[in-house]
Image (cartoon, rainbow, N blue to C red):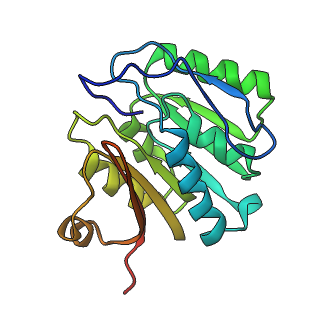
């Protein structure tokens, strides 16, 4: 979930674009600043993941700022072993729970709470892919990267969606390497991994 004060009204729903739940609509709750990851960006991201981590059935995913759940449900739709969605807003949580029940998505766990509080309780190196789409106006990018890096398995990947690309200096500070990068309108998105020694 990303937040911004101005811009186009988000769609009322987005659709899962691949896997066993392809074309399934996901509701977009009417919340200030909620902006789901666009279809085009998700398609690019999952093409990258299919190339870099074709072992989808063995993957464990985490979305620390779940919002609509589009990233996490997309991963689960494509056969991931487990997906954890973290969300603090009650309305968004209700929509996530309704979607899980409708899909009978038993591999999806939904955790209510603040992203950083929940992340601190999760075991280190437990996830193969961590999705980070923090609110754009919250200055959460740097701490989110720190939290995600601790949770990332050795060959894991972090997906980061932000208004401006993370600089090489910021990546060095976080001890992360850039794997792939793209831009769609006002959204920059990057795929990162733990820096090679």
Residue 166 visible in image: yes
* 27 or 194: nearer the viewer: 27
- Residue at 69% from the left image edge and 38% from the top image edge: 108
Does 83 sit above or below residue 145? above
Quadrant the N terminus occupies: top left
* 32 or 126: nearer the viewer: 32
- Residue at 41% from the left image edge and 29% from the top image edge: 35
* 7 or 97: nearer the viewer: 7
Does 90 sit above or below residue 77? above
Residue 153 visible in image: no
State the count of labels. 0
Residue 178 % position (x, y)? 37, 70
Residue 85 % position (x, y)? 56, 37
Q: In this view, does 55 lie to the left or right of 83?
A: right
- Residue at 45% from the left image edge and 55% from the top image edge: 159
Does 42 sit above or below residue 9? below
Does 113 sit above or below residue 169? above
Residue 109 % position (x, y)? 65, 36
The residue positioned farthest toward the bottom in the image shown: 197
- Residue at 45% from the left image edge and 12% from the top image edge: 30
Q: Is residue 25 left or right of residue 115?
A: right
Q: Is residue 165 left or right of residue 49?
A: left
Quadrant the C terminus occupies: bottom left
Q: In this view, does 14 lie to the left or right of 3?
A: right
Quarter location, residue 27: top right
Residue 193 % position (x, y)? 44, 69
């Amino acid at each position: 979930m990303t937040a911004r004060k101005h811009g186009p009204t988000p769609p009322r729903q987005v659709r899962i674009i691949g896997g066993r739940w392809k074309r399934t609509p996901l509701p977009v709750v009417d919340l200030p600043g909620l902006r789901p990851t666009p279809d085009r960006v998700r398609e690019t991201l999952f093409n990258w993941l299919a190339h870099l981590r074709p072992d989808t059935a063995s993957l464990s995913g985490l979305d620390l700022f779940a919002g609509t759940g589009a990233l996490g449900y997309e991963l689960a739709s494509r056969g991931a072993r487990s997906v954890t969605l973290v969300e603090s807003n009650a309305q968004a949580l209700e929509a996530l729970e309704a979607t899980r029940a409708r899909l009978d998505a038993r591999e999806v766990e939904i955790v209510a709470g603040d992203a950083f509080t929940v992340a601190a309780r999760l075991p280190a190196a437990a996830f193969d892919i961590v999705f980070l789409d923090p609110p754009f106006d919250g200055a959460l990018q740097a701490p989110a990267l720190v939290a995600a890096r601790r949770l990332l398995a050795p060959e894991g990947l972090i997906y980061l969606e932000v208004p401006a690309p993370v600089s090489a200096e910021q990546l060095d500070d976080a001890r992360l390497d850039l794997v792939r990068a793209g831009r769609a309108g006002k959204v920059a998105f990057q795929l990162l991994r733990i820096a090679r020694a």
